[in-house]
Image (cartoon, rainbow, N blue to C red):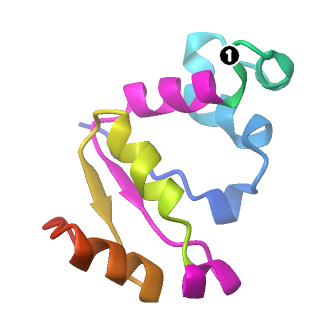
Amino acid sequence: RQFTFVNEFKEGIYIEKWYPKFIGSEGWTEEKTSDFLKDNEYGMGILYYNLFRTFDVMIITPKPYQKQRYGSIQRITSAMKSGVPVLVEAKGPAFEAFLDRYNYPCV
């Protein structure tokens, strides 16, 4: 089995730039990705749906700097809603509080 790590901080925050690199085998190009982002019906949701569907496990790390302090809990909940097993890096007060409050065992 192959392990793939999508590091948003290394790849950049614009999904249309790094998405084809990891999902390119399914015919995704930067142009196709940009077109989907403009689509009101599908938009970014379909891109993340395909991303979550492609991998067996998602590891959610907190964003650096200010977000690490206040957190971006949406990153955790979006991955959890996808149905893919989620591992969360408990780093920063917001992520730690979320995991403690919901007694989430995968830390």
Closer to the camera, 41 or 16? 41
Q: Position of residue 94 (x, y in %)?
A: 45, 80
Residue 37 makes an appearance in the image? yes
**Callout 1 amino acid:** Tyr
The reply to whether the magenta stretch includes residue 76 is no
Q: Quadrant of residue 16?
A: top right
Which of the image's four quarters has the N terminus? Answer: top left
Left or right of residue 87, residue 52 in this image: right
Give left or right: position of 89 versus 37.
Answer: left
For the image shown, how many numbered marks are present on the structure? 1
Residue found 41% across the figure and 45% down from its top: 79
Is residue 88 found left or right of 23 in the rendered image? left
Q: Secondary structure at mark 1?
A: loop
Tell me the residue that label 1 is attached to.
42
In the image, what residue occupies the spot 68% across and 16% down?
42
Give the side of residue 68 with respect to residue 20, left or right. Answer: left
Find out whether residue 66 is within the magenta segment: yes
Start-end of magenta stretch:
45-70
